[in-house]
Image (cartoon, grey):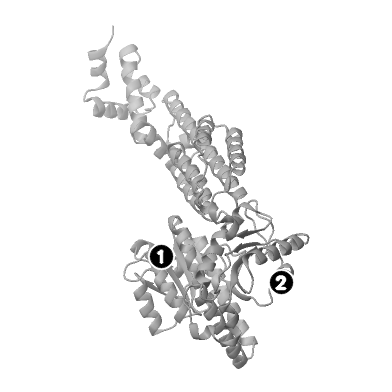
């Protein structure tokens, strides 16, 4: 069994509670693992220098050495170590920079046992797969081939990161990179996806066909595969295209996309402008290409986005959504889900008519508006449901992959919030019914269990909700009502004390007398004489 494999795991987080919780979860899930807890990146690095580590789970923000510095060191010095990034929603965009350092998984705080298990299971599977591959290939040939490929990959990766090795550029196989050229990033989806409004990913055969077309169009290209995004169905590759102008690259890729779309193969590409020396300016070219690739957000059927044509869009502000926000307020106040969905559809249609601003601006504008609406509904939703809904909204917007999906997510979240509000309203009505039942059955058995059964609540839950409503523990509330009834009956009737006790739920008149005296410091008889109305 995979769970029985001994792996060495390091957890790094400067927050003691978070570190201890994650460490304890891993211990319970995988008792065979050796789990080491560290409070900063320096401690992790020291541990790795003593003995190899299989998996590192690290937070981003830590003292001494933060998570980003740590994963960069691991990437360069311990390439076999699998890295998992611990992230909060507000750090998500920042954390994406970790992809280039082979961070293959991530966990969003707060931790859930199921998510930790799922992530570690994937990493274990990858470790096992790599181990099996290494055994099946000739050891010495594998080492030689991998060394050469890794050297080429590192050189090209360093170059697009701005670390120029001038001497290597002079080598014959890289000499073309000294000439003019263009950088491109292509993006495609592979396999199945369950996300809203996202087309099915490409099969292995379709991916092979895509690469065949790209290779045919650009025989001199240098291709640098990139680590997957946090969404594992997303694939990217950087193309360095010497002796190709940006206009030529755009024309070729647009033709390629049009041809492949006939076979349901779609991809997206972001292009830099033409650089006079592609190798020297590779990092600048890559930045431009990445900025342009972001516009895939608006196009579900693939697209080519060129810096020469689109860079001016970067500064266009998002259109005001205040009108739609006010309409959403009204729809939520009136609990009109259909109207809420209509407003979101109208907002989407209005924004589509505008010049398209930079995708991250659009995503931030809409997600911020919906999260603010959710926060305004906090007091109308049960606290546990509200916390879950808010955390879900952060994660869903962080992983949002398209313009269509942005608005589908917004409908889904507001719809769930409105349903939760309805549930709380119904529960409040049930609490009112419960209080009415108690007041009209003071002569009966009013044990907490019996009353809870009446409204189909758990006794502990009912007790807590009643205390929120009336400010008293359940037993104190019932006794208070019975004593109030007793005083009215003593003043307004000539009934016997024993009969009054029964009507107030006391079948032992002596016990009734003791409880009455404890509440009013006199006996029922004395109270009647002092307060009798006739």
Q: In which quarter of the image is residue 520?
A: top left
Which mark sits nearer the N-terminus, 2 or 1? Answer: 1
Which residue is the extreme one toward the top? 534
The secondary element bearing badge 2 is classed as helix
Residue closer to the observer: 467 or 244: 244
Residue for point 43% across, 32% down: 446
Residue 502 tag number: none
Which image quarter is the C terminus in? Answer: top left
Kindly identify which residue carries mark 2: 217
Q: How many marks?
A: 2
Across and down, in percent, residue 471 comes to 34, 33
Residue at the image point whose x is 52% and y is 53% from the top: 314
Which residue lies under the disc numbered 1?
60
Image coords of residue 223 (percent x, y): 62, 75
Q: Image point 58% across, 69% down: which residue?
A: 183
Residue neighbourhood size for the residue with mark 1, other residues' Cα within 10 Å, grouped as few (<14), some (14–19), many (≥20): many
Q: Judge by depth and name the residue closer to the eye, 346 or 105.
A: 346
SS at badge 1: loop
Q: Quadrant of the N terminus?
A: bottom right
């Amino acid at each position: 069994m995979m769970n029985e494999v001994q792996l060495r795991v390091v957890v790094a987080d400067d927050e003691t509670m978070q570190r201890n919780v994650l460490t304890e979860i891993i211990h319970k899930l995988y008792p065979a693992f050796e789990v080491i807890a560290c409070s900063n990146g320096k401690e992790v690095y020291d541990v790795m220098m003593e003995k190899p580590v299989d998996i590192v789970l690290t937070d981003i923000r830590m003292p001494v050495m933060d998570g980003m510095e740590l994963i960069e060191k691991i990437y360069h010095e311990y390439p076999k170590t699998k890295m998992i990034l611990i992230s909060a929603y507000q750090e998500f965009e920042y954390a994406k920079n970790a992809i280039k350092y082979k961070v293959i998984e991530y966990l969003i705080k707060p931790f859930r046992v199921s998510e930790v298990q799922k992530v570690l299971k994937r990493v274990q599977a990858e470790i096992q797969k790599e181990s099996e591959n290494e055994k099946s290939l000739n050891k010495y040939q594998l080492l030689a081939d991998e060394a050469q490929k890794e050297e080429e990959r590192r050189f090209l990766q360093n170059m697009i990161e701005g670390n120029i090795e001038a001497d290597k550029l002079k080598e014959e196989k890289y000499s073309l990179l000294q000439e003019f050229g263009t950088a491109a990033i292509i993006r495609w989806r592979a396999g199945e996806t369950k996300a809203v409004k996202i087309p099915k990913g490409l099969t292995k055969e379709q991916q092979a066909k895509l690469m065949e077309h790209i290779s045919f169009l650009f025989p001199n290209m240098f291709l640098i595969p990139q680590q997957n995004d946090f969404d594992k169905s997303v694939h990217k590759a950087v193309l360095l295209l010497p002796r190709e102008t940006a206009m030529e690259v755009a024309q070729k890729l647009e033709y390629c996309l049009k041809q492949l779309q006939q076979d349901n193969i779609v991809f997206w590409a972001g292009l830099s402008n033409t650089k006079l020396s592609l190798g020297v300016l590779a990092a600048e070219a890559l930045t431009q290409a990445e900025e342009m690739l972001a516009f895939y957000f608006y196009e579900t059927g693939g697209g080519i986005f060129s810096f020469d044509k689109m860079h001016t869009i970067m500064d266009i502000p998002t259109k005001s959504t205040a009108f739609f926000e006010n309409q959403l307020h009204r729809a939520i106040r009136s609990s009109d889900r259909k109207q809420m969905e209509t407003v979101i559809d109208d907002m989407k249609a209005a924004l589509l008519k505008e010049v398209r601003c930079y995708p991250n601006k659009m995503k931030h504008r809409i997600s911020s508006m919906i999260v603010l609406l959710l926060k305004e509904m906090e007091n109308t939703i049960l606290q546990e449901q509200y916390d879950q809904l808010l955390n879900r909204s952060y994660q869903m917007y962080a992983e949002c992959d398209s313009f269509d999906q942005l608005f589908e997510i917004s409908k889904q979240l507001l719809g769930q919030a409105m349903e939760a509000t309805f549930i709380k309203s119904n529960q409040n009505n049930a609490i009112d019914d419960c209080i009415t039942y108690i007041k009209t059955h003071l002569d009966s058995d009013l044990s907490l269990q019996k009353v809870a059964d009446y409204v189909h609540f758990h006794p502990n839950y009912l007790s807590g909700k009643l205390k929120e409503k009336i400010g008293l523990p359940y037993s104190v509330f019932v006794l208070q009502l019975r004593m109030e009834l007793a005083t009215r009956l003593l003043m307004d009737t000539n009934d016997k004390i024993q009969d009054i006790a029964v009507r107030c739920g006391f079948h032992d008149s002596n016990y009734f007398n003791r409880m009455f005296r404890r509440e009013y410091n006199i006996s029922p008889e004395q109270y009647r004489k002092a307060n009798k109305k006739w």
